[in-house]
Image: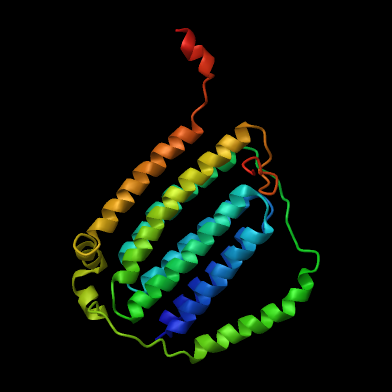
Amino acid sequence: MIPLSAYVAVSAALFITGLLGVLIRRNFIIVLMSVEIMLNAANINLIAFSHYLESMAGQMVALFIIAIAAGEAAIGLAIIIVVFRGKISTNVDEMNFLKW
Amino acid sequence: MVLVFFAYFALASIAAGVLTVALKHPVHCGLALLALLVHVSGLFILLNAEFLWAVQIIVYAGAILVLYLFVLMLMNLKTDDRYFHSSYLYFLVPAAIGSLFVLALLVRSPFGGAKGDATTEAILEKGDTHAVGIKMFSEYLLQFEIVGVFLLGAVIGAIVLAKTPKPASKERKV
């Protein structure tokens, strides 16, 4: 029997990896991929607790997270297309044209 | 046996996550992300969540990742800038101490709490999909409808954003 803390440790390691990706990488699309890694880490956590605490609520929330990740990917990639069409670089540090 | 599978899926998913963040070429990062998603879905199987395994494979690996690869291959996104704080090495020791503390808390914690009614036997009797479906369309119906409206808004927003803009003066002339 695998302890619950093993799943939580895997999820924490994946979340830190994704967070480092968001902080270090400057390519917009890789930043979005790192966000997906963090969402997956949250899903592992939710489903592990759902299994060990014998409740379906965790699996429900994980399903909604997957749906919202799909919407986020669609909108984020559409924004990348718009930015790329304006010949602005895809470096997230140089995208500051909404700054007041 | 379960322990072997767990170790494989856990280590492979962490390695794939590190590769996703560290690799240079964006398409390679996308393929590493695919490996990560497949191995995370293996962890879902070990937790008796077959329905979420199927959703992970179909929606994440099948739809979201293809969307990412589509955009990557349509555009030439090869910037490889990275940002490191000038004194980030000084933060390594505090970060290591903090993560050791969190690890010690994880190992010591009993994770006790009130248990629900979805025991493993109850789920295995009729399958995970049955349990998810009953719960989804009774207790979580409102949230389900809200997610549906959200996805419709996301689709319309993506179409509006990605459409080629027409100059406004041409439409006036007709």
Q: Percent x, y for residue A78?
A: 51, 39
Relative side of B12 to A88, left or right: left
Q: Position of residue B147 (x, y in %)?
A: 33, 52
Q: How is the image coloured?
A: rainbow
Q: Nearer the viewer, residue B3 or A61?
A: A61
**Residue B120 locus on image (x, y percent):** 26, 79
What residue is shown at x 30% (from left), y 70% (from top)? A57
Image quadrant where residue B19 sits: bottom right
User: Between residues A74 and A97, which one lies in front from this camera angle?
Assistant: A97
Q: Is residue B82 visible?
A: yes
Tally of numbered tags: 0
- Nearer to the camera, B64 or B155: B155
Extreme residue in the right direction: B86
Looking at this view, name the residue that lies furthest to the top. Answer: B174
Residue A51 figure quarter? bottom left
Q: Is residue B150 left or right of residue B27?
A: left
> Can residue B1 be seen here?
no
* Residue at screen point 67% across, 36% down: A88
User: Up-down: is B11 above or below A31?
Assistant: below
Residue in view at x 73 percent, y 76 percent: B92
In what quadrant of the picture does the N terminus of chain B appear?
A: bottom left
x and y percent of residue A41 in the render?
49, 67
